[in-house]
Image (spheres, rainbow, N blue to C red):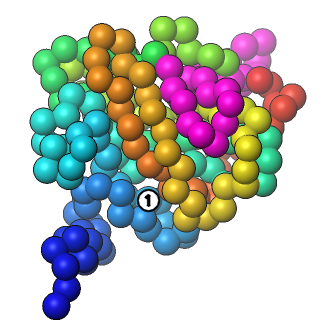
Amino acid sequence: MFSRPALTLAAVLALGACGAQPTQNAAAPASQAPTATTTTGAAPSASAGAALTITDPWVKTVKKGMTAAFGTLVNNTDADIAVVAGTSPLSPKVELHEVVEADGKMVMRPKEGGFVVPARGTHELKPGGDHIMLMGVTGEVKPGARIPFTLTVQDGAPLEFTAVGKDFAGAKEDYQPGAGH
């Protein structure tokens, strides 16, 4: 007989195929955007009460150098939440970045004050926009790789999640040294 976790995973994957949002780290094939919701809670059932969650977390594949992580931060409270820092065992240096126009060029830079997720709202992390920057990555990120992250929340519990490695060539961004960074 199948175990309860195996049946739960099968149900999540079946729902994902129908377009519903699965809960808790279900990996999609590398050709599709990962669909996962991860929370600060220790168990999937804790996700409903978490202050901050993330949907569709993914990391751009890379052999070495720099890369970035993306997804949508979701604030489940009645107050703004500020994400002020991040860490990952994949990189000794993680920064919260934005892409802005400067002197007629689009450049990446650290986002002063971090990301503010409005009360009962979302904040999208996307290529060519706000993102989590990983510099000096310590290993190759291949499609389907599972990369752990922790985001530090001002005056709140940290958000721990796992992002999935994904090939991506859009938005013409270049997360490599000397690329307007």
Q: Judge from the rendering whether residue 99 lies leftward or rightward of residue 77; answer left or right.
A: right
Q: Which residue is rendered at x = 55% and y = 41% of the image?
A: 69
Name the quadrant containing residue 172.
top right
Name the quadrant containing residue 121.
top left
Q: Nearer the viewer, residue 174 or 46?
A: 46
Q: Judge from the rendering whether residue 26 lies leftward or rightward of residue 110; answer left or right.
A: left
Q: Residue furthest bottom?
A: 1
Q: Which of 35 and 107 is in front in this view?
A: 35
Q: Which residue is rendered at x = 20% and y = 52% of the image?
A: 44
Helix, strand or loop under label 1: loop
At label 1, the amino acid type is Pro
Q: Is residue 100 visible?
A: no
Quick one: quadrant of the N terminus?
Answer: bottom left
Vertical side of 178 occupied by 55: above or below: below
Vertical side of 63 occupied by 150: above or below: above
Q: Which residue lies furthest to the right in this view?
A: 178
Q: Nearer the viewer, residue 33 or 49?
A: 49
Residue 99 lies in magenta, yes or no?
A: yes
Quick one: quadrant of the C terminus?
Answer: top right
Q: Judge from the rendering whether residue 87 lies leftward or rightward of residue 122; answer left or right.
A: right
Relative image position of residue 110 (x, y in whole percent): 62, 16
Q: Main secondary structure of the magenta part?
A: strand
Vertical side of 52 occupied by 15: above or below: below
Q: Which residue is rendered at x = 56% and y = 23% of the image?
A: 96
Bounds of the magenta span? 85-108
Q: Which residue is rendered at x = 42% and y = 65% of the image?
A: 27
Q: Tally the marks.
A: 1
Residue with the mark numbered 1:
34
Name the quadrant containing residue 94.
top right
Q: How crowded is mark 1: few (under 14 residues within 10 Å), some or many (20 or more)?
A: many
Residue 41 lies in magenta, yes or no?
A: no
Relative image position of residue 174 (x, y in whole percent): 76, 40
